[in-house]
Amino acid sequence: MSKPHLILASTSPRRRQLLEEAGYSFEVQPPHDSAECGICSRETPPEMVARLAFQKGADVALRTEQGLIVACDTVAECCGHILGKPKNQQHAREMLQLMSGREHRVYSGLCLWPRPGQEHHVQVEVTRLVMDSLAPDLLEDYLATDAWEGKAGAFGYQDGLDWVHVVEGSESNVVGLPLELLERMLASI
């Protein structure tokens, strides 16, 4: 069965790479910045990523007549704290110190929106991870690389870090696009 041509509602290089490696044909049509805002303190991480994925998909759907839109939003969560992309190095340090030696979760909301229709589909994937206890020198060495920039939870699983381990769930979800969930959702529509 051939894979459909997709419209990726994201500027994430990691999401593009995952789709390319999985053999999908796609074009990129990023949502406006306004579609990615609006954190609500009453939301759980799954509720937040589902809503943000929907908002991104809806924004791109307004400008798309034909195609299958794929929108995704990813956050990490540890000890009840939602960990998005760090604002600066100190923020990244605080996130990594919180996760050091602890289990945490990565949530991705995935929205598929076939156009020209209005019917959309949103599901959430969760992956459980554990981070080794980070020695202060290892933490500072990592922060100096700037590899934490633009990554939910201040780390990139795809960077081959030997101090972050998947306990249960999808590795591609941790990178930013749950490919297994995408395949299941595509098969159901």
Image: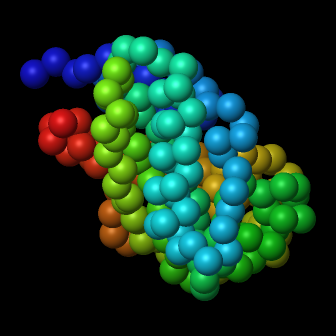
Image location (x, y in percent) of residue 156: 60, 51
Question: Which residue is rendered at x = 69% and y = 56% of the image?
Answer: 38
47 w.r.t. 149: above or below: below
Q: How is the image coloured?
A: rainbow
Q: Closest to the observer: 117 or 149?
A: 117
Q: How many circles with numbers are drawn on the protein?
A: 0
Residue at the extreme left: 1
The single residue placed furthest to the front in the displayed view is 118
Residue 140 figure quarter? bottom right
189 horizontally vs 182: left or right: left
Image quadrant holding the N terminus, namely: top left
Q: Nearer the viewer, residue 59 or 150?
A: 59
Residue 16 in sight here? no
83 relative position to 61: left or right:
right
Res. 10 image quadrant: top right
Residue 116 falls left or right of residue 104: left
Q: Is residue 127 above or below residue 145?
A: below
- The image shows residue 77 at horizontal and vertical percentages of 58, 72
Q: Position of residue 90 (x, y in %)?
A: 89, 65
Do we see residue 66 in this rendering? yes
149 on left or right of 178? right
Residue 142 picture location, percent across and down: 76, 57
* Residue located 47% across and 66% down the image: 46
Quadrant of the snapshot with the C terminus: top left
* Residue at 48 percent of width and 46 percent of height: 54
